[in-house]
Image (spheres, grey):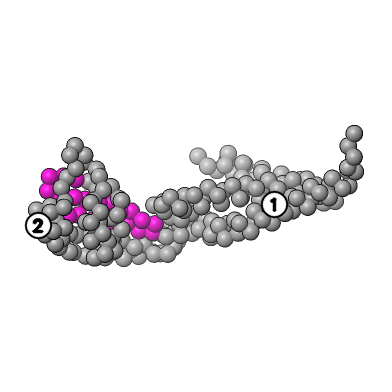
């Protein structure tokens, strides 16, 4: 036999759901604002002007560093030696450490994509000449790439997963709270129905 009266049980679940609802909303607040804003910028990308800024730099590897460059046996893709990557990062701020490099007979090439831009670096194995080019497409492009998780790294990937879970908790607890309060709010289910039907109808009729 259930010893807990129904009103007390309802009050317990209301308190628990409200707690999970506000905690999840607090956790995903900044992420939801970011994704709402970048949703607008992505959807209206053709109306937002952006000018890419391209920076090109040259350098010369010192002989002791150059001598450490040799193609890995049997591999066409492998990171640069740690000392070489350190010198390049200190000299050019290129961010090459741990990045896979493409090795050929006379050149090492690194593609260095990044959020909000792009970059590449090449090293002539004979002369030690280094050429580095970096493209910066601005803050809007940077935030759009955060939205898409493009070239953002492992830490941001983890954040997106945690953010998605927080959004699920926020949405599902909100749905249950709607159900518990629906008796006193006649517009609850018609509004929920509109929220479901409108995107489904738009997708079926206008997306091909």
- Residue at x-position 18% and y-position 64%: 58
Q: Where is residue 130? Give x, y as percent.
A: 17, 59
- Residue at x-position 83% and y-position 50%: 11
* Label 2 or label 1, whichever comes before in sequence order: 1
> How many numbered marks are there?
2
Q: Where is residue 149? Give x, y as percent.
A: 45, 51
Q: Nearer the viewer, residue 78 or 201?
A: 78
Q: Is residue 135 visible?
A: yes
- Residue at x-position 88% and y-position 47%: 7
Residue farthest to the top, as pictured: 1
From the viewer's perspective, tell me whether residue 15 is left or right of residue 151.
right
Tag 1 secondary structure: helix
Label 1 belongs to which residue?
20
Between marks 2 and 1, how big is the CA–CA gap?
62 Å
From the viewer's perspective, tell me whether residue 15 is left or right of residue 134.
right
106 inside magenta stretch: yes
Q: Main secondary structure of the magenta part?
A: strand
From the viewer's perspective, tell me whether residue 204 is left or right of residue 85.
right
Q: Where is residue 138? Give x, y as percent.
A: 39, 64
- Residue at x-position 70% and y-position 48%: 173
Q: Nearer the viewer, residue 199 or 77?
A: 77
Q: Is residue 183 visible?
A: no
In the figure, residue 197 lies in which quadrant? top right
Q: Give the extent of the magenta segment.
A: 103-123
Tag 2 secondary structure: loop
116 inside magenta stretch: yes
Which disc, if any, is residue 127? Answer: 2
């Amino acid at each position: 036999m259930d010893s807990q009266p129904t009103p007390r049980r309802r009050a317990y679940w209301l308190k628990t759901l409200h707690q999970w609802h506000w905690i999840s909303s607090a956790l995903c607040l900044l992420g939801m604002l970011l994704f709402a804003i970048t949703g607008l910028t992505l959807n209206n990308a053709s109306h937002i002007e952006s000018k890419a800024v391209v920076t090109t730099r040259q350098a010369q590897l010192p002989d002791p560093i150059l001598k450490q460059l040799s193609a890995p046996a049997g591999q066409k893709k492998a990171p640069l030696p740690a000392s070489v990557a350190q010198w390049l990062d200190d000299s050019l701020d290129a961010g090459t450490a741990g990045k896979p490099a493409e090795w050929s007979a006379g050149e090492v090439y690194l593609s260095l994509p990044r959020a909000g831009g792009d970059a590449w670096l090449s090293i002539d194995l004979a002369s030690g000449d280094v050429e580095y080019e970096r493209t910066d497409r601005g803050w809007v492009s940077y935030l759009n790439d955060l939205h898409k998780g493009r070239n953002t790294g492992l830490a941001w990937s983890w954040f997106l997963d945690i953010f998605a879970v927080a959004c699920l908790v926020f949405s599902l607890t909100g749905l249950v709270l709607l159900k518990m309060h629906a008796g006193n709010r006649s517009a609850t289910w018609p509004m929920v129905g509109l929220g479901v039907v409108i995107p489904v109808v738009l997708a079926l009729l206008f997306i091909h």
